[in-house]
Image (cartoon, rainbow, N blue to C red):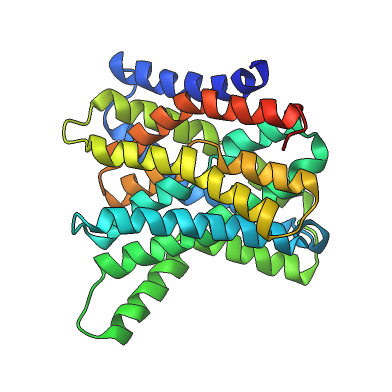
Amino acid sequence: MSVILNAVFPLFALILLGYVAAKKRLMGPGAVDSLNKFVVWMALPALLFQAMAEISWQEINQPGYLAGSLLAIAVVFGASCLLDRRRNGRLADVSIEALAASYSNAGFMGIPLCLIVFGPESLPAVVLAILLTACVLFAFSIMLIEIDLLQTRSVWRTAGKVGRSLLRNPLVAAPLLGLLVALVGQPLPYAVTQFTTLLGAAASPCALVTIGLFLAQGSPNERHGAVWRIVGLKLLLHPLVTFVLVYWVFQMPPMWAAVAVLLAALPVGTGPFMLAKLYEREPGVTSRAILISTVLSLITVSALVALIDAQIL
């Protein structure tokens, strides 16, 4: 239990800090937009760029792990879309809810948790999970949102607008640029690495403080059904599908399989909230889903860690 508390307490503390700051009026309503734009346009792109630029072939040469993790994300994303489309919702809203249901907090919670449970040898697996989540899942969700919000009568014109919007989006452009750097094989200069490290380190605390600020404003139109649907898909379906795929369908080292299941069981990350706030698509739903799933993950993740410790997983 101490392992889980050590990983989760900083998240709660930062969210609470933002909540208290808003209630005490230390930060006004405009701080939510300002901090969110800082994370989306500066801090998180720096983190993604550095992660992609420093990746090596040895770290990503796990096809079973990649296939199992990505297919599990796709199953949960698709299940959420099917459930949500019954309300005849907008594609942008459906996409953000599906993103939240399949978006694990691998970066902010997964790294410290896996370091404690598995040790430093688990870091490549966590990095791969972060890249899949941020560069594949995130980019796909942004594409669906842009298709919905930039509708035109011409399919090609819509595709062109979507493509230009994606390339201008720092959350897509930054990892693509980092991938190009990695393919060249030239290490980043020390000054650039220090810059991206310092800037990227601000992504997590600022995003969590922003959630606290937003929660303090209240969300009277919050859809409780959508929140609990996201939480259920994330904490139950995602790890269950991942378990079946990494243990019964694909082949990989035992530690990689256990890491995949543990990361899938993590609560909703802050990415969907930042995207919902950026596009103004009911951010109250994703912020509440993050809070509830993080609280409940104390139970679900603790159970998984106990199984791993007993060498059952």
Name the residue: 47% across, 29% down.
294
- For the image, the number of numbered tags is 0
Residue 200 in picture, x, y percent from top left: 60, 43
Residue 152 in picture, x, y percent from top left: 21, 78
Residue 90 in picture, x, y percent from top left: 22, 59
Which quadrant does the N terminus fall into?
A: top right
Residues 247 and 112: in front is 247
Q: Is residue 208 above or below residue 253?
A: above
Name the residue: 32% across, 86% down.
156
Q: Is residue 245 left or right of residue 160?
A: right
Q: Is residue 126 left or right of residue 206?
A: right
Name the residue: 60% across, 18% down.
5
- Examine the rendering and report whether any part of residue 52 can be seen: no
Q: Is residue 102 left or right of residue 21?
A: right
In which image quadrant can residue 92 be found? bottom left
Q: Is residue 192 above or below residue 39?
A: below
Q: Is residue 248 above or below residue 173?
A: above
- Examine the rendering and report whether any part of residue 312 can be seen: yes
Name the residue: 76% across, 71% down.
184
Q: Is residue 258 left or right of residue 168?
A: right
Q: Is residue 142 above or below residue 223?
A: below
Which quadrant does the C terminus fall into?
A: top right
Residues 96 and 19: in front is 96
In the image as oriented, which residue stretches furthest toward the top? 24
Residue 8 in picture, x, y percent from top left: 56, 24
